[in-house]
């Protein structure tokens, strides 16, 4: 089973930037879709961004123009550059992946905490 490890979370002020990383073991990322999800206290987990095996990105409306997802298949690593952070971005951020032919994400990381103060 692949392991996903997120890093890069932290406590920042509104307007600041953070870069999250997700390192994957064992799988060759080139055939996998990768995604970022987040869960705020008292809320359900929600989609943030995804990058398909062919490199095409997709974003939630709430983060469009502020977040950028990317991947480096040579390093088996995915990134989420988060700019102009808002207090409502505060959440635990999880990375996930799935084979491009699968419907559901089936591997998840343990999460990294992002706290944005106003």
Image (tube, rainbow, N blue to C red):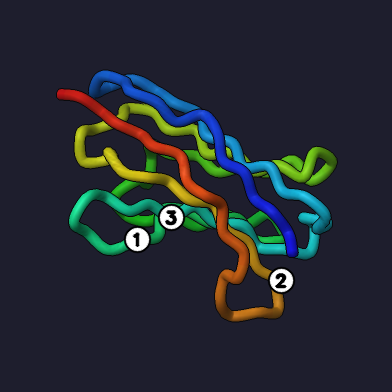
Q: Earlier in the sequence, mark 1 or mark 2?
A: 1
Does residue 102 appear left or right of residue 80 in this picture?
right
Q: Which residue is mark 1?
A: 46
Q: Which mark is residue 37?
A: 3
Q: Which mark is residue 99?
A: 2
Disc 1 to disc 3, how far (Cα)? 5 Å
Quarter-of-image position of residue 106:
bottom right
List x then y, in percent, for residue 104. Answer: 56, 76
Q: Earlier in the sequence, mark 1 or mark 3?
A: 3
Q: In the figure, 30 relative to 16: above or below? A: below
Q: In the figure, 117 relative to 58: above or below? A: above
User: At numbered mark 1, what does the secondary structure look like: helix, strand or loop?
Assistant: strand
Say few, some or many: other residues with alpha carbon within 10 Å of mark 3 (under 14 / 14 to 19 / 20 or more).
some
**Quarter of the rendering occupied by the N terminus:** bottom right
Does residue 51 appear left or right of residue 18 in this picture?
right
Say few, some or many: other residues with alpha carbon within 10 Å of mark 2 (under 14 / 14 to 19 / 20 or more).
many
Disc 1 to disc 2, how far (Cα)? 20 Å
Q: Residue at x 70, y 42 (%)?
A: 77
């Amino acid at each position: 089973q692949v392991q996903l490890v997120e890093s890069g979370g932290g406590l920042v002020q509104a307007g600041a930037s953070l870069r999250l990383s997700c390192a994957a073991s064992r799988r060759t990322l080139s055939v996998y879709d990768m995604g970022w999800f987040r869960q705020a206290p008292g809320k359900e987990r929600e989609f943030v961004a995804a990058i398909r095996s062919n490199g095409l990105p997709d974003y939630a409306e709430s983060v469009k123009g502020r977040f950028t997802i990317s991947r480096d298949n040579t390093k088996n690593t995915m990134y989420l550059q988060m700019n102009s952070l808002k207090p409502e971005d505060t959440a635990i951020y999880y990375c996930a992946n799935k084979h491009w032919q699968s419907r559901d994400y089936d591997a998840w990381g343990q999460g990294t905490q992002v706290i944005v103060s106003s």
